[in-house]
Amino acid sequence: MENRLQTIYEAASSLFINKGYMRTQMKDIAKEIGLSTGMLYVYFKGKKDILDFILKCTIDPDFIQQEFQYPIDERFFERLSEEIITVLNESHAKFSEPLSREADGYLFEQMISDAFDTIARYGTGCLVLEKNINDMGVLGDYYQRYRKSFFDNILSYVKIYIHIGEMRAVKYPELTAQQIVETLAWWGMHVQNDAFETQKNIPVSVAKEICMDNLLYAYKK
């Protein structure tokens, strides 16, 4: 059952990201994985429950391993929005904490590593939100603020690292921060989900290695 749920998770995630949640129907998900539409309804009561399942697995990877009473429905996701916001708030607080001490003892390389890990961990769910931002209600609004805060943190780190000589000087710190975020996002989530030629089988460790090599070569002093 876990393998079947994983297959549904991957197929639905891809469709919600690349086709859009509103344009995807249960029959599209079923076709993608070679199931009848009726069989898909054995596992999930509806499309919204599959969306919630994806978002729940994003913040709790072990969720997919539990024993379920089928079909999976809204009973499993009663406080999901609050759970997602809490998890991402905690992630934001942890990532921004070194800023309170001007990144003392927190090197550029470690910051890039931590930023990549955050994006890679939550990437699929965040892409689902990002690609369907106007259909996600309170989570869509929250995600836009979260993404802006993430960028602001990267920009703050860039300015500090330039000031203390950890990064080479750049003419446009804001654009440099944007380039860093986009590089992290490309290797952390886009390459496996919505690149022109997706690389589903690229290990996260390899994607991280390439990403960090590029950024350290470009900006490490």
Image (tube, rainbow, N blue to C red):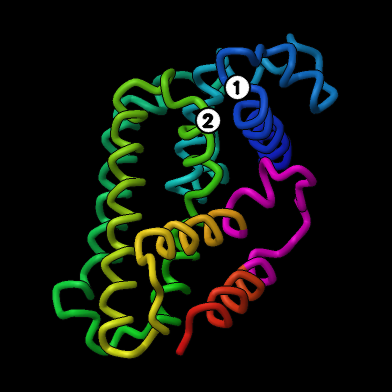
What is the x, y in percent for residue 54?
53, 35
Q: Give the magenta part as a residue range.
A: 187-207
Find the distance from the CA under tag 2 to the CA under tag 1.
Answer: 7 Å
Q: Residues within 10 Å of mark 2 (few under 14, many from 20)?
A: some
What is the x, y in percent for residue 68?
54, 31
Residue 47 lies left or right of residue 101; in this view the side is: right
Label ID, residue 37: none
Total marks drawn?
2
At x 68% / y 38%, what residue is drawn? 10
Residue 160 lies left or right of residue 193; in this view the side is: left
User: The disc labelled 2 sits on which kind of residue?
Assistant: Lys
- Quadrant of the snapshot with the C terminus: bottom left
Query: Dot 2: what SS?
Result: helix
Residue 109: name its quadrant: bottom left
Q: Nearer the viewer, residue 14 or 171?
A: 171
Q: Would you say the residues marked 2 and 1 are in contact, meaning their CB atoms lie under 8 Å apart?
A: yes
At x 62% / y 48%, what residue is drawn? 190
Residue 186: name its quadrant: bottom right
As for residue 149 lying within the magenta part, the answer is: no
Which residue is the extreme one toward the front? 171
Query: Dot 1: what SS?
Result: loop
Label ID, residue 131: 2
Q: Nearer the viewer, residue 67 or 175?
A: 175
User: The disc labelled 1 sits on which kind of residue?
Assistant: Gly
Give the answer, above or below, for where 70 lies relative to 9.
above
At x 77% / y 53%, what residue is drawn? 199
At x 78% / y 56%, what residue is drawn? 201
As for residue 194 lying within the magenta part, the answer is: yes
Q: Name the residue under label 1.
A: 20
